[in-house]
Structures are given as structure tokens and as C-alpha cells.
Image (cartoon, rainbow, N blue to C red):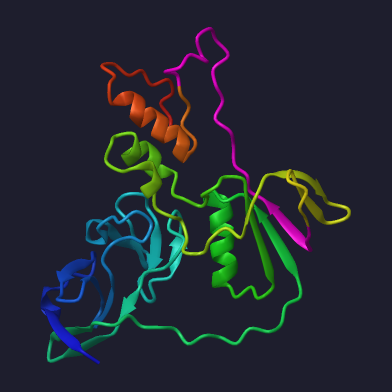
Amino acid sequence: MNMRIVARLINLPENRGVRVETAAHPVLLVRVGDQVRAFEADCPHAGAPLEQGVICNGHIVCPWHKAAFAVDSGAVREPPALVGLKQYPVQVHDGVVSVGDTALCAEPTPLPHDSRCLAVIGAGAAGAAAVANLKRDGFAGRLLWIDREPNPAYDRTALSKFVIAGQMAADDTPALLDEAVVIHGEVQRLDAAAKRIELVDGRHFDYDAALVATGGDAQRLDIPGAVLNNVFVLRSREDAARISAAAASATCAVIIGDSFIG
């Protein structure tokens, strides 16, 4: 294993992480007593530099969206991050800290046969979080992940932050998970008694348990002019692309609403 000297133990505080640059990749060093752990340096949710966050109650807390990770393992503890931090091997010898180039890999746990079928309808934050937790907890049955958007399971927070500001193309909005949505289609009917899902295109699927995580729809104002060409709502990649295109030649913008998106 290739180990690189990155720091001295005496220079690592216990109340925050320290970012170090290696020839392989940047690493976040976290000191707990005389032990040091090394993780990927940027939050897997949106790339925030974790050394700018805090270490509190055994958690590494992201400075941007407050995702939290366990300091002992890097496991995700609080969303919006859905996957944990990559962890790297560490050696401390005579006060000198060395880190390996290759991330640690957990030994796969053999999973028992599971004949159940679980359906998750919706690929927004809630649906993606459910799928991530099922995978992380070792669900070994059949998983039906259904969403009506053509390219779902992306980070909608990037739409209001980066896409409409022209800093990111709508098609480059990062995915929430590496896993792809299994079924693209719009659910027309869910028969809870028969445990069957029917799609608009005629396909149908039987299930043992279903989670409906379809989120909300952006509501247009019920006022004159709300349907004019340059009046938009922001919910999807397509919405953000239309706003970005209109803003390119605009001289004035009006935002109605001052909550998270506004």
C-alpha cells in the first residue's frame, strides 16, 4: 500500500478537520485524541469543502447544507448527503501522519434471499433517500424505483443556486445517487388492496410494499398575467433551462416568494 506523509499529529486540532493535498487527491484529516482518520475532502452532496465545516458531537458537519457524517467511519448521519465519505488508511508513527492512496473498502456482507418487492414512487430527495437507505441497510429484495421525469434523481437544489445563475447547464445537474431509476413512467393508479401499480402507458407492477414520495408541484399564482411567456415556476431541469434562457436577454427579474427557492 502506498502511504504518503501528510502532516504532523501536533498540528492537527481536535475541533475541526484539516484539508491536505496529496499527489493522489485532497484528504480531510480528523483527529480524535491520538487517533487520526482520513476521508475524502469534499462533501459528496454538492462538493463543499468539509474543512470549512465543524466537528460536533461525533459528526463532521458540511458547511453548506449541514449534511453530517460520523467521525469514526464517514457514514452519512444526516441528509441532504445520501452516501458516506470515502475513508482512507492512516498510519501515525512518531507523531508523523501518513495516508494511503486507495480508499478502504468494507467487506461485503452476504445477504439472505429476500422475495419481497418494494416500490418507491418518486425520485426527488425523499425517494432517493429511501433508495439510498435501503441499499445501505442491505435490502436484498426486488426494488422498483419509478419516476415520471425522463432523467430523474438529480439534485434540485442546484437549479436555484447554479443553473439559473448561468454557472451550470441544466443537463449537468448532479445526480443524487449512482443508482439509476429503474422505471420511467407516470403512475396512473395505485391499488393498495391488490398491491398493484398501473402506469399511464399500460404497464403494471405488483408489489409487497410501496412508498409514495412524489413531492409537490410548483403552484402558479391565480392572478391575471400568470400564464404569460416570461412567467416561470422552478421545479425541474426544464424549468431552470427556460429561466436561464430568458434571463440571458433580460434586464430586470422579479422573484415572488422568499422561502428556500426564492
Predominant SS along the magenta part: loop
Magenta includes 92? no
Residue pictured at 43% horizontal, 70% vertical = 75
Task: Pick the quarter of the image with the N terminus.
Answer: bottom left
Front position in the image: 111 or 56: 111
The quarter of the displayed image where residue 114 is located:
bottom right
Give how far across and how far down residue 27 sits, in percent.
22, 71
Residue 5 versus residue 19 in the image, above or below? below
Front position in the image: 174 or 130: 174
Give how far across and how far down residue 4 sits, in percent.
15, 84
Residue pictured at 41% horizontal, 68% vertical = 84
Residues shaded magenta? 205-231
Give how far across and how far down residue 15 sits, in percent.
24, 65
Give how far across and how far down residue 50 sits, in percent.
27, 60
Residue pictured at 76% horizontal, 60% vertical = 209
Residue 260 visible, this orientation: no
Magenta includes 225? yes
